[in-house]
């Protein structure tokens, strides 16, 4: 796999995602037409947060007492004692994708605000449960719900948020609501399968995990919901099946790029920006994408890394582990692979939305999530 | 509260449930017109299981690998190693209520089979999660999912079953499907609130828990889904809002009766029939309905019980605890209260379905669940 790490075109591909060839067969890739400096994405995200927040708060406030309190804490709107807080409710990437996709396909954003909130509720339900399973103690720079309220309440609040999301869509009179609900529910099943694969992989021997496994897992765990957000937006714009699927594929590929970059940040990034300590993934022996690529590289550094990963983390090993992943090409591979996935995302986007002007917002969002590494 | 224990008409009532007066003001209560010997209910349950099982299996088999395997184990269709099993998938009371309510209101059962399966999926999702939270090791005479597959997989399989249920309704073309989905999702939120109240109560001092608290909790945790099952059936029969609500209230009251009897069985019942060891609820210091009624009785036995409940269970205390609940009137109260709730259930049923012949099936099911004590 030495060559493969410097030659992303030869990387194994996700079975479900079709041919791995470079994008842009027929139409120019919009990226080149509209380079974005990140301000556009930030503006879109801020606007999405402003538009969706009232709907989200209304939905959460409809929950009965205890569930409401836990959810409000999770979203950063309240402290654990119930006093108001001005916390970080996340970057609203998924609602922004829903709303931007609706507009990009000629629909009216206003009709999809509830759907955008529903997608965000599903995202937050998975965070609540994942934190319980992964024993993650910090989320958005605050103690996670299970550490404050206990496992049972974190599980229940997550269950309630899933139900709330699907209830919102069931009560939505828009003609696309039922299809959106079916898609979102199917996505939840995929998210569960992805999280299952993730936890199963963590228990496996380093040699047992293949790059295909970990790419499949990342697609299910991260790509699926970003794809679903875009597809839901397309549905609310009244797009045809082909465009809905292209938007889903766009979101999935961008999601994989996002996860690759997130994993890179998890090893080499700035904890002040990520909210988790640098190297935590390595200390926890997490089989993140760069690590699995490094393990599969057949290099001497890979053997060193496998040896390190077979035992628990020991004080002072971090630097050596980081170096092994880097020397085995894990970092380069992940960054190349992220760029490759972005290329595919652009290609899918241009199939559904050939006009670079109309596609600009979605493009800016996709570039924003991958630019987090710089 | 001494009198209250022998005089159920004066018991505190659930705020939401309206006046506590005896049922049957205007119309004859169908119970007297069609006494049921239990065979009818058994036949209805067996038929519901036969009709719904293929739909349920189809839905579960649509899950991705690991989620499917866990769910198939939970339903008793497979052993943990994946070999076929002929386990007990439960009594199908909720699907039977859906299908029987459709027929009772003049609808066609066939259109509601998917909805009946969806309700059963939600029930099983809550069992998976409740067993994790309550650390219950046995369910339907088999080791619970979390004991076999771990907490994470039990949480994920539950999440997937909730999503599957709501996906089935979102993909259902029946005109009532959206209303049914909204109702089922709202019910999930209520179930979560009920389970939260239950776990919170278990942590409380015996003196802090009121009978109203525990009745509210039981309505949310048990009554809500039985009510929802009946209401979903009514929706699929095209019933008007008033009848849908009456059916919901019927199911809730029958559900409370069921819970009261279940709690009685949990103390005095036959573990061969319940699948849990006799007295387990008392050893776990569970604040079940008879226990809370006993604690609130103001009798000397109540003081003895409160004293016992303040400490952890000690070897040999079981007999004394059982006796204290009984002497404080907990058993009599629960049985009287169950009868009272059944009376209210019949009254609600007769409002929506005055014809005793048409109401017979629902009546038989309600009587079946409360007859479990004999």
Image: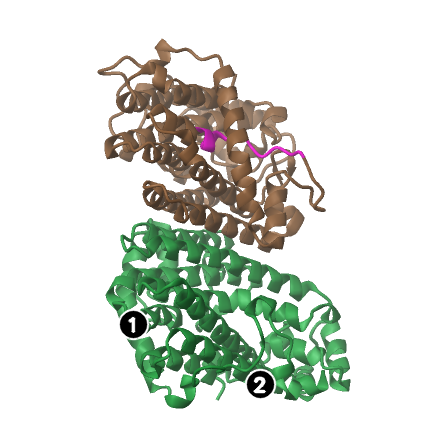
Chain colours: A green, B brown
Above or below residue A327? Residue A193 is above
The first of marks 2 and 1 along the sequence is: 1
Q: Is residue B43 left or right of residue A60?
A: right
Which-is-in-front pick, marks 2 and 1?
1
Q: Secondary structure at mark 1?
A: helix
Quarter of the picture holding the N terminus of chain A:
bottom right
The residue shown at (32%, 62%) is A236
Q: Is residue A278 left or right of residue B353?
A: right
The picture places residue B165, in percent across and down from the top left corner, at 46, 46
Above or below residue B250? Residue A244 is below
Which residues, given as a range, are shown in magenta? B86-96
The residue shown at (56%, 85%) is A335
Question: In this orientation, which residue lies closer to the viewer: A220 or B295?
Answer: A220
The residue shown at (66%, 78%) is A293
Q: Chain of mark 2?
A: A
Q: Chain of mark 1?
A: A
Question: Does label 1 lie on the same chain as label 2?
Answer: yes
Can residue A22 be seen by looking at this rendering? yes
Q: Main secondary structure of the magenta part?
A: loop
- Which residue bears the numbered disc 2? A336
Above or below residue B334? Residue B57 is below
Can residue A276 be seen by looking at this rendering? no
């Amino acid at each position: 796999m030495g060559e493969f790490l410097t030659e992303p075109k030869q990387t194994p591909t996700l079975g479900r995602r079709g041919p791995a060839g470079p994008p842009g067969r027929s139409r120019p890739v919009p990226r080149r037409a509209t380079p974005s400096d990140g301000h556009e994405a930030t503006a879109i995200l801020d606007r999405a947060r402003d538009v969706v927040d009232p709907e989200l708060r209304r939905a959460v406030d409809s929950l009965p007492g205890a569930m409401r309190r836990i959810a409000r804490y999770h979203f950063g709107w309240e402290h654990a004692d119930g006093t108001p807080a001005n916390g970080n409710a996340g970057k609203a990437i998924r609602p922004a994708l829903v709303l931007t996709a609706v507009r990009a396909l000629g629909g009216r954003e206003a009709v999809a605000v509830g759907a955008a909130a529903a997608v965000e509720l599903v995202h937050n339900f998975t965070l609540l449960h994942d934190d319980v399973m992964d024993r993650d103690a910090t989320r958005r720079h605050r103690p996670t719900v299970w550490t404050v309220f206990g496992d049972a309440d974190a599980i229940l609040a997550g269950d309630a948020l899933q139900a709330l999301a699907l209830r919102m869509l069931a009560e939505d009179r828009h003609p696309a609501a039922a299809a959106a609900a079916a898609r979102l529910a199917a996505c939840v099943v995929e998210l569960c399968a992805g999280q299952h694969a993730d936890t199963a992989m963590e228990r496996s021997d380093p040699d047992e995990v293949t790059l295909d496994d970990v790419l499949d897992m990342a697609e299910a765990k991260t790509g699926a919901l970003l794809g679903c957000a875009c597809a839901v937006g397309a549905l609310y714009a009244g797009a045809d099946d082909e465009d809905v699927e292209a938007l889903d594929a766009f979101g999935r590929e961008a999601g994989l790029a996002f996860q690759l970059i997130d994993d890179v940040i998890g090893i080499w990034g700035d904890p002040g920006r990520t909210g988790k300590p640098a190297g935590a993934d390595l200390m926890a022996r997490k089989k993140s994408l760069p690590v699995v690529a490094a393990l599969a590289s057949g290099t001497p550094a890979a053997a060193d890394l496998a040896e390190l990963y077979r035992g628990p983390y020991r004080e002072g090993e971090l630097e050596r582990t980081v170096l092994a992943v880097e020397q085995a090409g894990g970092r380069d591979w992940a960054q190349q692979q992220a760029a490759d996935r972005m290329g595919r995302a652009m290609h899918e986007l241009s199939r559904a939305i050939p006009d670079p002007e109309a596609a600009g917002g979605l493009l800016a969002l996709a570039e924003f999530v991958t630019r987090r590494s710089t």
